[in-house]
Amino acid sequence: MILKRPEKLRNSLTRTRQSVFSRLAGLLTQSELTEETWEELEALLIQADVGVETTIELVNGLRERAAHEHIRQADRVQALLKEQMAALLRVPGRGYLSGEKQPLSVVLVVGVNGSGKTTGIAKLARYHQMRGERVILAAGDTFRAAAIDQLRVWADRLGIDLIAHQEGGDPGAVVFDAVAAARSRHADVLIVDTAGRLHTKHNLMQELRKIHTIASRQLPGAPHETLLVLDATTGQNGLAQARTFGEAVAVTGLFLTKLDGTAKGGIVFPVVRELKLPIYFVGTGESAEDIAEFNADEFVAALFG
């Protein structure tokens, strides 16, 4: 199964690790803790896009523990920092589709154009295939040119049925037909693509709410997950995107993409801290198999090398 791949995760975080966290690890192998150590630690965390507020919270927490436990050696602080960072990424609550088992699980996937959403959907479909589940895709992004064609390429490659209407059609009608088709074909999982045009925020909100309503009318409890695909290369802009989608629809978890293309993988910390949303999956490459279930301890370990 494609579940946890620490080595692929580590490879995908190479740029973040080399640009900032290797320097951070070097800083915390110094012999003695000084005020300069704390200041440089703050600067490095902010440079990694951990965010000012999250950085202050982490460093203040470390200072308090160091004082309380009479820690004078910098290398002991590194272990505490890893522990605090991992704790920040653990969101209490259920895991991905961990509620009561459904005959059909509907997963809504949202995210801006260019975030890696289509490839993320393919990876998610492959993830379910590897678990022995029958998957159907719904092409709910009827607005963007070529969105349906791109999804069809992946569906053909994976041997998965795709429910699609013509470009410019009503995405609500696509979802209506997709739920009906998934039920009649005894699918286990229906994954629904959606439009991601943030520049028309009002329309986006209306469209997502409509899709959500239609899915729930067709199948009580649906959608069972709403995943937000976040492009790690966008840095702090990813936080603004997450807020916007959170206003439009009840996002239940995150799928982080393009970690291998950025030196600012630290963005996950302010996103999780502010939104209180769990990261369910991480994309670790370009193929459909390059998906890993998120694990906070593995992620932090990979950041530090």
Image: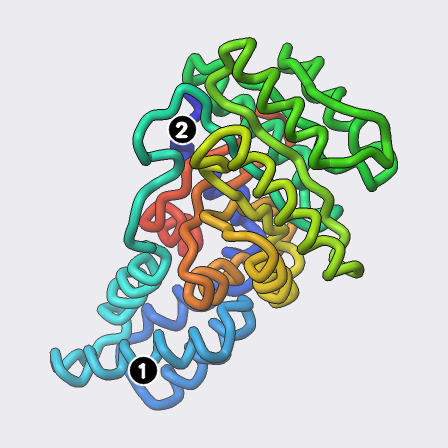
Whether tag 1 and tag 2 are in contact, CB under 8 A, the answer is no
Instruction: Place residue 168 in its image quadrant.
Output: top right
- Classify mark 1: residues with Cα within 10 Å, few (<14), some (14-19) or many (20+): some
- Please say if 300 is above or below 161: below
Amino acid at pointer 1: Asn
Q: Residue at x 66, y 40 (%)?
A: 117
Residue occupying the far left of the picture: 69
Measured as percent of width and height from the top left, residue 176 is found at 64, 28
Instruction: Place residue 162 in its image quadrant.
Output: top right
Measured as percent of width and height from the top left, residue 167 is found at 86, 32
Q: Residue at x 66, y 59 (%)?
A: 234
Determine the secondary structure under disc 2: loop
For the residues labelled 1 and 2, the Cα–Cα distance comes to: 35 Å
Q: Which mark is residue 3?
A: 2
- Please say if 107 is above or below 57: above
Observer-nearest residue: 285 or 31?
A: 285
Measured as percent of width and height from the top left, residue 156 is found at 71, 13
- Please say if 283 is above or below 152: below
Q: Which residue is mark 1?
A: 60
